[in-house]
């Protein structure tokens, strides 16, 4: 498992020291967590890092460190939850991807909802590029398209038309992908099973029929929420209720 302590610590300290009036206290808490991590005191590291997230510090590197501490502490569910949250913020971090992939190998359950290989081939850019990168490409292509159309209107050069058609096609593709990613991020909720084993039931109570069992680290889709329970979907034919405390929303 990889964890570049000095790089992570340096970047986080810069972020923490410029974040708020209570930056000194936050920096001290982070340093305490880092020291505990280096000593192998995983519970103390988790406590320190969680204090920062509970205060509203939203930072991908902090989430990555927290995921590492949970994984070292043999808590696969919380480790994957914080890795998933970190991936939303630093999707291109290679060390995060390495540790995340390792965590996936420890998960007992097979992935529930799988994208077909054909979709991954046809829409490879969606899976190979981060949402932020796709947004930037869409913005650049839109700018280039309008500039090209303006040049075409002024100079009326026929040689520009094939290039503009290609740019327009790329603009539509990446703009549509960016829109889909936005809808997916804002409308679709996913969660991670946290305990070692969870019974998914047909209703809220412990006496409700047990439909199936899921294990720590399994990713599910949240279909509905109440104050105490989540209706989750594992696969198309496996859906049921779990307690809120048993699934962390990403």
Image (cartoon, helix red, strand yellow):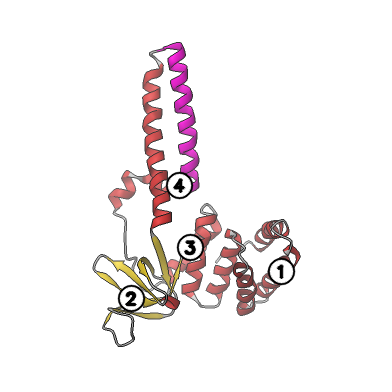
Which of the two discs, 3 and 4, labels the residue nearer the N terminus?
3
Labelled disc at residue 84: 3
Horizontal side of 74 relative to 28 (left or right) equals left
Secondary element under disc 2, as helix, strand or loop, is: strand
Pick the front one: 61 or 73: 61
Which of the two discs, 2 and 4, labels the residue nearer the N terminus?
4
Q: CA distance from mark 1 to mark 4?
A: 33 Å
Secondary element under disc 3, as helix, strand or loop, is: helix
Which of the two discs, 1 and 3, labels the residue nearer the N terminus?
1
Labelled disc at residue 31: 1
* Residue depth check, mark 2 versus mark 1: number of the one nearer the observer: 2
The answer to whether mark 2 and mark 1 are in CB contact below 8 A is no
Q: Main secondary structure of the magenta part?
A: helix
Q: CA distance from mark 3 to mark 2?
A: 22 Å
Q: Which residue is mark 2?
A: 241
Q: CA distance from mark 2 to mark 1?
A: 40 Å
Q: Point out the residue furthest to the bottom here.
A: 207
Labelled disc at residue 129: 4
């Amino acid at each position: 498992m990889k964890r570049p302590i000095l790089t992570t610590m340096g970047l986080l300290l810069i972020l923490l020291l410029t974040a708020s009036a209570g930056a000194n206290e936050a920096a001290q808490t982070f340093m305490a967590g880092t020291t505990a991590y280096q000593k192998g005191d995983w519970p103390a590291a988790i406590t320190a890092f969680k204090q920062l997230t509970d205060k509203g510090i939203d930072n991908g590197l902090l989430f990555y460190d927290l995921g590492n501490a949970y994984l070292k502490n043999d808590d696969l569910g919380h480790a994957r939850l914080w890795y998933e949250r970190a991936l939303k913020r630093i999707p291109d971090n290679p060390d995060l991807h390495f540790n995340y992939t390792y965590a996936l190998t420890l998960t007992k359950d097979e992935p529930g909802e799988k994208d077909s290989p054909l979709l991954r081939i046809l829409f490879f850019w969606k899976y190979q590029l981060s949402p932020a990168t796709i947004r930037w490409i869409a913005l650049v292509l839109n700018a280039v398209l309008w500039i090209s159309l303006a040049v075409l209107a002024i100079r009326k050069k026929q040689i520009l038309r094939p290039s503009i058609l290609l740019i327009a096609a790329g603009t539509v593709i990446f703009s549509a992908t960016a829109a889909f990613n936005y809808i997916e991020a804002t409308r679709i909720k996913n969660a991670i099973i946290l305990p070692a084993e969870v019974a998914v039931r047909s209703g809220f109570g412990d006496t409700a029929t047990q439909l199936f069992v899921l294990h720590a680290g399994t990713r599910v889709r949240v279909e509905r929420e109440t104050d105490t329970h989540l209706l989750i979907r594992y696969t198309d034919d496996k859906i049921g209720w779990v307690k809120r405390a048993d699934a962390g929303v990403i």
